Image (tube, rainbow, N blue to C red):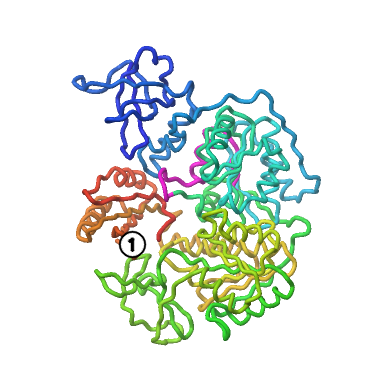
C-alpha cells in the first residue's frame, strides 16, 4: 500500500510513502502519522491511500513509522473544508489541515463521558413580537437543512436572547451549537449568562490563549459529538463538529472575524457559510450594524433578513448626541464641551469612556490653527509623515501611494503652518490626568491587555462595576460595553477614524458610532460626543435618528461607484526585502503577472515602519467574480526571488 502525506510546512505539496503491512488497517485519510521527513522523524497527515503507485519507479520510497490516531479526529468535511480554504484564501494545504487538527502527537482524542446532564434554565420574561417572530420562523425550518439568517436591529431589541433560546433548543435535542464573538475578553458577562443558563459543563469557551489541557478536553468532546454550546472567537469555526445544528455570529460586522495575521487566512462569515451548509445547520448572523458584504447577500436573497424593531422593556432611551470641535481653550485634545461633561460625570460619580483609535505607526500632519489633517490630493485620504534615508522627509498616502511635500495649505482655514501629531491613548491619559488629577483613570487597548497584570483587564471590570472615573481606550473598548455602566462616551478624533488606507474606514466608523449609541440608549441620560474638525466630512444625520440602514445604503453606493467589495474582490500582495532595488524589481514582476486578470492594480504602497529591518510595500489587485479565484491561485503559487518574501491576502482587512 502507498499513501500521500502532508506536513505542517510552507510547501504546497504532498509526499509519497510506503505503508507497512502491520499499519495497513490503521492508515486511512485524516489520521496523523510519524514519518521520516528529510533527516528527521516528524508528524504528518495522510490525505490519500492507494494500492497503485503514483511516484516515479526509480524513486526509493520511505515507510511511515507509526499511526498516531485510532480514527480520524475530524469529520468527513475535513478535506472539502481544507480545499475550500485553500481556494478562497490561499495557503499550503498541509498548514491548513494542521490548523484544523493539533499537530502534537500527544494530543489524542479522549473517549466521550458515559453520562451527560442537561438542565436548561430559561428566564421567565415576556418576549417582544420581533423575538417571537424570529423564533417561530427558525423553529419552522425543516431539520438538517441549511438556512442562513440575519437578525438585524438596534441594540436592546433582543437579538442575543433569541440566539440563546435557539441554542437551548439545540442543546435540549442533544445537538451542538457554535456562538462566535469578536473578543473573548470583552464577552465575559455573556459567557457567564450562558453558563448559568446551560450549565458550566455544557458550555465550552474556546480561544487561542486557553490551556492545552482544556483545549484537549473540549476538542475531544466536540470530536465525539458531545452536546454542547461552544462560545468562541473566530478560531471556533475550525473545530471538528460532528452534530452542528446551529451556528451564530454575534456582531457580524466586526473586522476581528477576518484572520490574516497568521496562516491559514480566512473570514469567519464565508467559512461558516460553507460549514453550516455541509452540516445542514441553521446559521444566524446577529448585528445592529451588519457589514456591507452581509447586506449585499441579503439583497441577493442569499440570506434571509429578520428585522428586530421593538426594544426590550426598560431599555428604550434616546441618548443625547453632540458634534463638537476637536480642541478647546483648556486642552488641545478635548473640546470645552467635553471637559464640562466629564466634570459633570465626575461629580455624579459616573463612568466616562474616551475613544481614540490611534492605529499603526504613522504620524499625521495637521493644521496648527484648526486641527484639520493634510489630505492626499489624489484620493482624499489622510497623509502620513515619513522620514526615510531613501526619500527624505515627506508626506505619504497609505491608501494609493501618492507622495507630497511638507508644504501644505489647510483646506479649511488656508493656514500654512502644520505640525506632526503622533501618540495615542497614552498621550490622552496624560492630558486627562492634568485636567482631572483626582480622577481614577484606566487605559484599555491591546497593549494593556497583553498580560493579566496589565490594567486592561482592570478596565474591563471597571466598565461593568463603575470602579473607574474615566477609561481611555481604542475601538476595542466600544465592543466591551455589554452590561457596562458608562453614561458618557466620546470619540476624540473623527478624522483619524474616517481616513486612512482602509476603504472600510467609513463603515467601521459608522459601526462604532452606532454601537456607542446603542449602548447609551440602554442607560438613562446617555450622552455621545463626537469631536471633528470638519463636521461635513461625514453624514451624522442617520446617527441622530438612529437609522443605520441609511448609513449602510450610502456606504453600498460609495463602494459600487469606486469598485470596492462587495462589488469586486481585492487581493493584497505584500512584498518584503532588504534591498530597495530588488524589492522594486520583484514588485514590478508581480504587477505584470496579475495585470491581465485584474480590473485595476493599485500601488505599490510603501508600508514599512521606521524600526523594520525589511523594506515593505504592497500591491492591491481589484478583480471581478469570474477571475478572482484564478488570480488568487496564480499569485499564491508564485515563487519570489531569493531574499524576497511575499504574503498574499484575499479580501484584505489590514492595510497598515
The residue tagged 1 is 608
**Residue 154 visible (yes or no):** no
- The spot of residue 540 in percent (x, y) is 58, 71
Seen at 34% across and 25% down, the residue is: 35
Tell me, yes or no, whether the highlighted magenta stretch contains residue 172: no
For mark 1, does the 10 Å Cα neighbourhood hold few (<14), some (14 to 19), or many (20 or more) residues? some
Q: Which residues are magenta?
A: 260-285
- Where's the N terminus, which quadrant? top left
Which residue is most to the front? 453
Seen at 29% across and 70% down, the residue is: 388
Q: Quadrant of residue 485?
A: bottom right
From this view, report whether residue 521 is shown above or below residue 150. Answer: below
Seen at 33% across and 28% down, the residue is: 41
401 sits left or right of 541 in the view: left
Seen at 58% across and 45% down, the residue is: 180
Q: Secondary structure at mark 1?
A: loop
- The spot of residue 50 in percent (x, y) is 34, 18
- Where's the C terminus, which quadrant? bottom left
- The spot of residue 580 in percent (x, y) is 22, 61
**Residue 545 visible (yes or no):** yes
Amino acid at each position: 500500500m502507498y499513501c500521500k502525506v502532508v506536513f505542517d510546512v510552507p510547501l504546497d505539496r504532498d509526499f509519497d510513502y510506503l505503508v507497512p503491512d502491520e499499519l495497513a488497517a490503521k492508515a486511512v485519510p485524516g489520521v496523523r502519522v510519524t514519518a521520516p521527513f528529510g533527516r528527521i522523524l516528524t508528524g504528518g497527515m495522510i490525505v490519500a491511500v492507494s494500492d497503485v503507485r503514483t511516484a516515479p519507479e526509480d524513486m526509493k520510497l520511505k515507510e511511515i513509522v507509526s499511526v498516531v490516531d485510532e480514527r480520524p479526529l475530524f469529520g468527513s468535511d475535513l478535506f472539502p473544508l481544507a480545499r475550500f480554504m485553500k481556494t478562497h484564501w490561499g495557503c499550503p494545504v498541509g498548514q491548513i489541515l494542521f490548523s484544523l487538527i493539533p499537530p502534537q502527537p500527544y494530543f489524542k482524542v479522549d473517549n466521550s463521558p458515559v453520562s451527560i446532564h442537561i438542565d436548561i434554565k430559561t428566564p421567565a420574561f415576556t418576549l417582544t413580537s420581533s423575538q417571537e417572530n424570529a423564533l417561530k420562523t427558525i423553529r419552522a425550518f425543516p431539520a438538517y437543512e441549511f438556512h442562513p439568517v440575519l437578525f438585524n436591529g438596534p441594540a436592546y431589541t433582543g437579538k442575543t436572547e433569541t440566539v440563546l433560546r435557539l441554542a437551548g433548543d439545540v442543546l435540549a435535542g442533544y445537538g451542538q451549537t457554535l456562538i462566535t464573538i469578536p473578543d473573548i475578553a470583552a464577552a465575559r458577562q455573556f459567557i457567564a449568562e450562558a453558563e448559568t443558563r446551560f450549565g458550566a459543563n455544557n458550555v465550552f469557551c474556546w480561544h487561542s490563549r486557553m490551556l492545552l489541557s482544556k483545549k484537549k478536553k473540549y476538542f475531544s468532546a466536540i470530536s465525539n459529538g458531545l452536546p454542547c454550546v461552544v462560545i468562541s472567537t473566530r478560531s471556533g469555526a475550525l473545530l471538528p463538529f460532528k452534530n452542528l445544528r446551529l451556528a451564530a455570529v454575534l456582531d457580524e460586522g466586526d473586522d476581528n472575524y477576518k484572520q490574516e495575521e497568521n496562516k491559514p487566512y480566512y473570514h469567519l462569515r464565508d467559512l461558516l457559510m460553507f460549514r453550516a451548509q455541509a452540516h445542514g445547520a441553521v446559521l444566524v448572523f446577529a448585528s445592529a450594524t451588519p457589514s456591507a458584504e452581509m447586506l449585499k447577500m441579503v439583497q441577493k436573497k442569499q440570506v434571509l433578513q429578520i428585522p428586530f424593531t421593538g426594544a426590550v422593556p426598560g431599555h428604550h432611551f434616546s441618548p443625547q448626541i453632540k458634534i463638537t470641535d476637536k480642541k478647546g481653550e483648556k486642552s488641545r485634545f478635548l473640546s470645552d464641551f467635553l471637559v464640562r461633561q466629564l466634570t459633570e460625570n465626575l461629580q455624579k460619580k459616573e463612568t466616562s469612556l474616551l475613544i481614540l483609535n490611534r492605529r499603526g505607526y504613522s504620524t499625521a500632519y495637521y493644521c496648527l490653527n484648526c486641527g484639520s489633517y493634510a489630505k492626499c490630493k489624489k484620493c482624499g485620504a489622510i497623509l502620513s509623515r515619513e522620514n526615510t534615508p531613501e526619500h527624505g522627509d515627506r508626506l505619504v498616502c497609505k491608501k494609493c501611494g501618492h507622495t507630497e511635500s511638507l508644504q501644505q495649505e489647510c483646506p479649511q482655514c488656508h493656514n500654512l503652518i502644520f505640525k506632526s501629531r503622533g501618540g495615542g491613548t497614552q498621550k490622552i491619559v496624560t492630558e486627562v490626568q492634568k485636567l482631572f488629577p483626582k480622577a481614577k483613570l484606566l487605559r484599555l487597548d491591546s497593549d494593556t491587555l497583553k498580560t493579566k497584570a496589565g490594567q486592561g483587564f482592570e478596565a474591563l471590570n471597571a466598565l461593568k462595576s463603575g470602579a473607574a472615573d474615566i477609561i481611555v481606550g481604542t475601538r476595542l473598548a466600544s465592543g466591551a460595553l455589554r452590561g457596562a455602566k458608562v453614561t458618557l462616551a466620546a470619540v476624540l478624533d473623527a478624522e483619524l477614524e474616517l481616513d486612512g488606507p482602509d476603504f472600510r474606514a467609513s463603515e467601521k466608523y459608522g459601526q462604532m458610532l452606532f454601537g456607542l449609541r446603542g449602548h447609551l440608549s440602554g442607560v438613562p441620560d446617555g450622552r455621545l460626543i463626537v469631536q471633528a474638525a470638519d463636521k461635513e466630512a461625514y453624514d451624522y444625520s442617520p446617527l441622530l435618528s438612529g437609522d443605520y440602514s441609511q448609513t449602510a445604503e450610502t456606504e453600498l453606493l460609495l463602494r459600487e461607484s469606486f469598485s470596492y467589495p462587495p462589488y469586486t474582490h481585492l487581493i493584497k500582495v505584500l512584498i518584503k526585502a532588504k534591498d530597495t532595488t530588488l524589492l522594486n524589481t520583484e514588485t514590478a514582476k508581480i504587477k505584470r503577472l496579475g495585470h491581465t486578470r485584474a480590473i485595476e492594480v493599485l500601488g505599490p504602497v510603501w508600508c514599512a515602519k521606521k524600526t523594520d529591518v525589511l523594506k515593505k510595500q504592497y500591491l492591491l489587485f481589484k478583480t471581478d467574480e469570474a477571475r478572482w479565484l484564478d488570480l488568487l491561485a496564480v499569485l499564491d503559487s508564485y515563487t519570489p526571488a531569493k531574499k524576497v518574501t511575499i504574503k498574499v491576502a484575499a479580501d484584505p482587512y489590514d492595510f497598515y
